[in-house]
Image (spheres, rainbow, N blue to C red):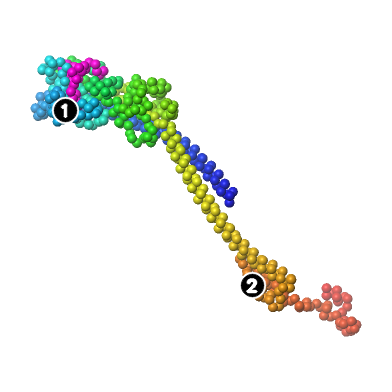
Amino acid sequence: MLGLIVVLYISLTTLQNSTVREIENTLDDTATLDVIEFVTEYSNTLSNQLNNVGMISSYLTLYLQNLQINTTALKLPFITDYESLPRDCTVTLPSYDNQQVCMNYSSVYYFHSEHSEHNKSYTKYLGYLAYVFPDIFNLLSPLLHRILIYVPDEQSLIVFPGQDIPENYNITNEPWANFNIKNNNFSFTTLYSDSLNSNKKVISLVQNLFAPDEFKLKDPPRLNVEIQENALYELFSTSGFFMENELKLLSTNNGTILHDGSNNIFSKYTTVEDFNIKLWESAVNCDFDENHFILYKEDCFFRVSIQSVPLDSITKDDVLIYVFLFVKENSVMKYKNETQDTLDSLMYLLLGLTSGIVFVIVGISAVIINLTGKSVSKPLESIKSLTDRIYSGEVDIKKELENELKNIEEGTEQVADLVIAFRSLVNTISHRRDTEMPKKGKNKIYPPNELFGTGRITWKDMIKED
């Protein structure tokens, strides 16, 4: 029984080790596929959202083209300076450095006083966009931070949500103000500080805006859509397999890190190259069909996957944003260890159950063998005992033998025939014990004084009888 348990334990241990190795390999493959799939999914989501932002100009152009300049059916909406906006529309929002902003209306700012009195017909024309700005903003939330329209010919700036413009604000310092945009495409700026909210970092999508010929504008109006760097991280899915140990990192095409506002391992770095030069080289030279590798940083091993964000406005070889996804190796090991612990528990449970079953089977078998042995041995012992007593003369053959034979149990079918045969044999022997066996020759022998009488037997007759 002990040998059976040892063999069983060895078999279960071998099976467990084999299963653990298979699960470890499966977890490695699954972790790799999950990281690649997750970073690819986010890259596609971000690409779709940014391309949707790029559609704002087309949507606004279509909207303006369908308006008649002299339309009287529509009342001219609010497009005035911030001080003239209704006070009940302003709110204080942390995303705007707790400044007062109006989420229902746009505000306009003129950089030169002479433009505030004349030559502002196009700016007024854009007032019709006040109907659609809130819907666009809500549709692309939380990505959008601010929509600005700069009209160089009229030196005006329309801002949504409406807010007060600082007096020292100089629009020529904005990186998007002098962009040379061709073919009605959109372009993205690099990361810069928001001049209206100096504590925020933004990137901008810049496009030319439609202007009817009758306005005779020399420089095209400039549509600028601001996106805060931390808002890009809000598009990350929360359904990742290793969410508790995932780290997300975004960078622009020059390696500038876009921070999510948290104090993680990237917060003290400005560029990806500063964080890890090999990581940046891998991103720049990465074949995105094989974008998964191991990185050791900050005393920890990471599984890293890289993906670029494709955009409609740039060529396939250009990159605007890189997406990096880091998964701590110890999180993968955690699942491995948990799986092994589960297998160990199941193995010990199975071993215990099997051992218990073996003990039960062995116990039952021992009882059966014992009972069977007794049923076989008891008749045999009775036969031997009776035989010994007969030879020793303890049993009176004439008076006691018949009862003694009846007292012998037949037992199981294995010995029942033997007991029956023994009874028959003993009965036969006991009944003929004193019986003389007749012999022909003996019956024909006469007494000595009659040897020569009539009918005597000769030696030849004796031979014939034998």
Image location (x, y in percent) of residue 367: 57, 60
Residue indicated by mark 2: 407
The region drawn magenta spans: 150-176
371 in magenta: no
Horizontal side of 365 relative to 439 (left or right) equals left
On residue 105, the disc is: 1
Q: Is residue 297 above or below residue 360?
A: above
Q: Quadrant of the C terminus?
A: bottom right
Image location (x, y in percent) of residue 439: 80, 77
Q: Residue at x 89, y 83 (%)?
A: 450
Q: Residue at x 67, y 72 (%)?
A: 423
Secondary structure, mark 2, is helix
Image location (x, y in percent) of residue 32: 42, 32
174 in magenta: yes
Quadrant in the picture for residue 289: top left
Q: Amino acid at mark 1?
A: Tyr
Secondary structure, mark 1, is loop
Horizontal side of 194 relative to 461 (left or right) equals left
Q: Residues within 10 Å of mark 1 (few under 14, many from 20)?
A: many
The reply to whether the C-beta atoms of the residues labelled 1 and 2 are less than 8 Å apart is no
Horizontal side of 13 relative to 214 (left or right) equals right
